[in-house]
Amino acid sequence: MEGMLGAAYPWVKAVHIIFVIFWMAGMFMLPRFFAYHVECEAGGPEDALWQERERRLMRIIINPAMIIAWILGLSLVAHVGLGAGGWLHTKLLLVVLLSGFHGWLSAARKRLAAGERRLSSRQFRLINELPSLFIIAIVILAIVKPF
């Protein structure tokens, strides 16, 4: 098999997909946690429980999964090369935007922990749908390679 990964390419790709799934699972869960979190009283015992759940989700699942998915994904890009087509550039742009959304969720978690309630439960439920839009487009680009 050609490319820098050689015969390891399908294994790297498989592990990359596994960690993308872990990352997305967390990205679906966190805004839903926020929707429930904003419904409780700031500073109360339930607030403390949500803060701990959200912190653990970010530290144990979401952040490590994103980092590993990025490292393996960049390895795959190095294997196929940036000349693979416009689909790859578009996919990378969407992954960068998804990573920015990840950062926004991290900041929202810190604001909630500080007692700030900028968004409503309903708004967080709507925000919860954004990862779906990203993942649909990213998977179509990676599998179909439309351009």
Image (spheres, rainbow, N blue to C red):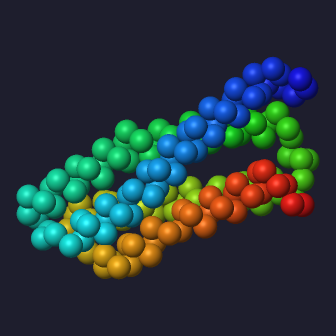
Would you identify the image quadrant in which residue 111 lies?
bottom left
Q: Position of residue 80 (x, y in %)?
A: 85, 38
Residue 32 appears left or right of 50: right
Quadrant location of residue 6? Answer: top right
**Residue 67 horizontal side relative to residue 5, left or right:** left
Residue at point 47%, 38% (across, down):
64
Quadrant position of residue 99: bottom right
Figure quadrant of the N terminus: top right
Q: Could you say where residue 67 lies in the image, as x and y percent from the top left?
A: 54, 40
Image quadrant occupied by the C terminus: bottom right
Q: In the rendered image of this protein, does residue 20 appear above or below residue 123?
A: above
The structure residue drawn at horizontal position 20% and vertical position 68%, both measured from the top left corner, is: 115
Q: Residue at x 45, y 67 (%)?
A: 128
Q: Give the mark count.
A: 0
In the rendered image of this protein, does residue 24 appear above or below residue 70? below
Nearer to me, 28 or 112:
28
Q: Is residue 15 visible?
A: yes
For this view, does 89 lie left or right of residue 12?
Answer: right
Residue sitting farthest toward the left: 45
- Is residue 111 visible to the viewer in this orientation of the structure? no
Residue at the image position 42 percent from the left and 41 percent from the top: 61
Q: Is residue 99 rendered to the left or right of residue 147? A: left
Return the residue nearer the eye: 115 or 87. Answer: 87
x, y (%) of residue 20?
Answer: 58, 44
The x, y position of residue 143, in whole percent, is 78, 50
Q: Which residue is situated farthest in the top direction here?
A: 7
